[in-house]
Amino acid sequence: MEREKVMIIADELRNIVAPLQRNFFEKSYSVYGNLSALQCNILTALSASGKLCPTDLARYLCTSNQRLTRPLAGLIAKGLVEKTKSANNQKTVYVSITKNGQDIEDAVHSYLTKNLGFLLSFVSEEDAEAFYDALLTMRRVIDKFDSK
């Protein structure tokens, strides 16, 4: 692909992701437990994956262990995530979502779904379908990046 197109893709991704994060997702995070974006992403990851060691969780979220430490500690302190030691190796620690954490994750997901449905009501069915198809294409391409 031409360098110019690659630069446009990079700019457009940044221009899409930052406003979505700021205006759509962050509002939902503050509604439920005043959680940070990273804390909600941790709950979502643990809800989808079950228990993970912090290193695998950091990799799953495309971040570092250091960046994960404080938000994870906050979730543990709020009783939304629990830490357990491996039965096989006492040095290995796992984190998992608690019932309260899952309730928050479910509420955030419901809030996002409701608000996205509301926003999509302002566009034509054809545009909503095109948006959906574009997201599936993006996911397919990103999955190919992950496999490299």
Image (cartoon, rainbow, N blue to C red):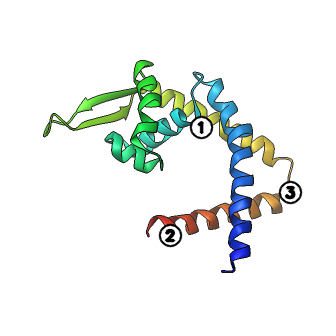
Tell me the SS state at disc 2. Answer: helix
Dividing the picture into quadrants, the one containing residue 66 is: top left
- The residue where tag 2 is placed is 144
| Secondary-structure class at tag 3 | loop
Residue 133: image location, x then y, percent: 69, 65
Quarter of the image with the C terminus in it: bottom left
Q: Is residue 106 left or right of residue 19?
A: left
Residue in view at x 36 percent, y 34 percent: 96
Which class describes the residues within 10 Å of circle 2: few (<14), some (14-19), or many (20+)? few
Mark 3: few/some/many CA within 10 Å (<14, 14-19, 20+): few
- Hey, what amino acid is under mark 2? Lys
Q: Alpha-carbon distance for marks 2 and 1?
A: 26 Å
**Is tag 1's residue or tag 3's residue first in the polypeptide sequence?**
1
Residue found 71% across the figure and 38% down from its top: 22
Q: Position of residue 72 (x, y in %)?
A: 43, 30
**Other residues around mark 1 within 10 Å, as few (<14) / some (14–19) / many (≥20):** some
Q: CA distance from mark 1 to mark 3?
A: 24 Å
Q: Is the Cβ of the residue at disc 1 closer than 8 Å to that at disc 3?
A: no
Q: Secondary structure at mark 1?
A: helix
Q: Examine the rendering and report whether any part of residue 90 can be seen.
A: yes
Q: Which residue is mark 1?
A: 109
In the depicted structure, whether residue 75 falls above or below residue 9: above
Q: Position of residue 134 (x, y in %)?
A: 70, 64
Question: Circle 3 sits on which residue?
Answer: 124
Q: Are marks 3 and 2 in contact (CB under 8 Å)?
A: no
Q: Which of 36/143 is in front?
A: 36
**Residue 50 place in picture, x, y as percent:** 36, 41
- Of residues 117 and 104, the one drawn nearer to the viewer in this rendering: 104
The residues tagged by marks 3 and 2 sit, at their Cα atoms, a distance apart of 31 Å
| Kind of residue indicated by mark 1 | His
Image side of residue 129 versus residue 142, left or right:
right
